[in-house]
Amino acid sequence: MDSQLVFSLFLLVAVLFAGAMAMGLLFPIVREHFKGSPGGWAALAGAYATTVKPTGEIWRGQSIVAGKILYRSCVTVGIDRAGLYLAVTTPLRLIRKPPLVIPWGAFQRVEPARLFWRKATLISLGTPTVGTLTVPTDLYACMRPYLPEPLASFGTPGGLGS
């Protein structure tokens, strides 16, 4: 056999082996991402899934973290008296999630966080805690008028968490 052919076969086997190893390591991570993590979208959907469309202000292409999973630039957010509306907007059927309406009374605790190296707010939802959301500070500011005290004063000068 020609040494060039032997080398090509060896290289092919090495690439296939490396690919199989990578898939073996990455598949569980990808599967967990689409399944959702504890306290993530699936847990929130169990408590707050909806078929109702929001009637208030709407922002498309928002980034949030549900549980430990980042939804980057693909979340539609609505704010009205009923609660916080969240829907993942993507053409990929694999990562579609049921839309949520989280009533303002479900917001239990807030604390400072970071989202893309910017200030954000980590929100614990439900009693007992169903899940968490991390939202950018500007989105949290839009939610303030609907939140119960002392959550509404979080991050304001002299308020909770300032």
Image (cartoon, grey):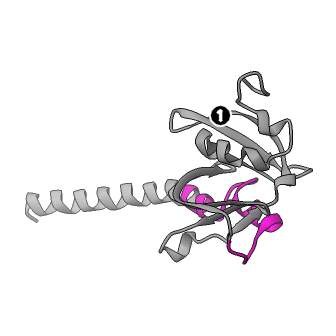
Q: Main secondary structure of the magenta part?
A: helix
Please determine whether, in this image, residue 2 is positioned above or below residue 113: below
45 or 83: nearer the eye?
83
Residue at 73% across / 76% down in the picture? 52
Q: Residue furthest right?
A: 127
79 relative to 108 in the view: left or right: left
- Say which residue appears at 71% left-offset and 55% top-offset: 40
Image location of residue 68, percent across then percent down: 65, 48
Side of 121 where 19 appears, left or right: left
Residue stretch in magenta: 29-53
- Check disc 1 and give the amino acid type: Ala
Q: Quadrant of the C terminus?
A: top right
The residue sitting at 30% across, 61% down in the picture is: 13
Residue 94 in view: yes
| Displayed quadrant of residue 124 | top right
| Residue 11 location (% of width, % of height) | 23, 57
Residue 48 position (above or below residue 140): below
36 or 62: which is nearer to us?
Answer: 62
Badge 1 is on which residue?
113
> Image check: 14 left or right of 94?
left
Q: Nearer the viewer, residue 153 or 11?
A: 153
Residue 47, horizontal then vertical, whole percent: 83, 65
Query: For residue 100, what is the image quadrant?
Result: bottom right
The quadrant of the picture occupied by the N terminus is bottom left
The quarter holding residue 81 reads bottom right
117 magenta-colored: no
Q: Residue at x 54, y 59 (%)?
A: 30
Task: Give the crowd class for mark 1: few <14, some 14-19, many >=20 residues within 10 Å.
Answer: some
Q: Secondary structure at mark 1?
A: strand
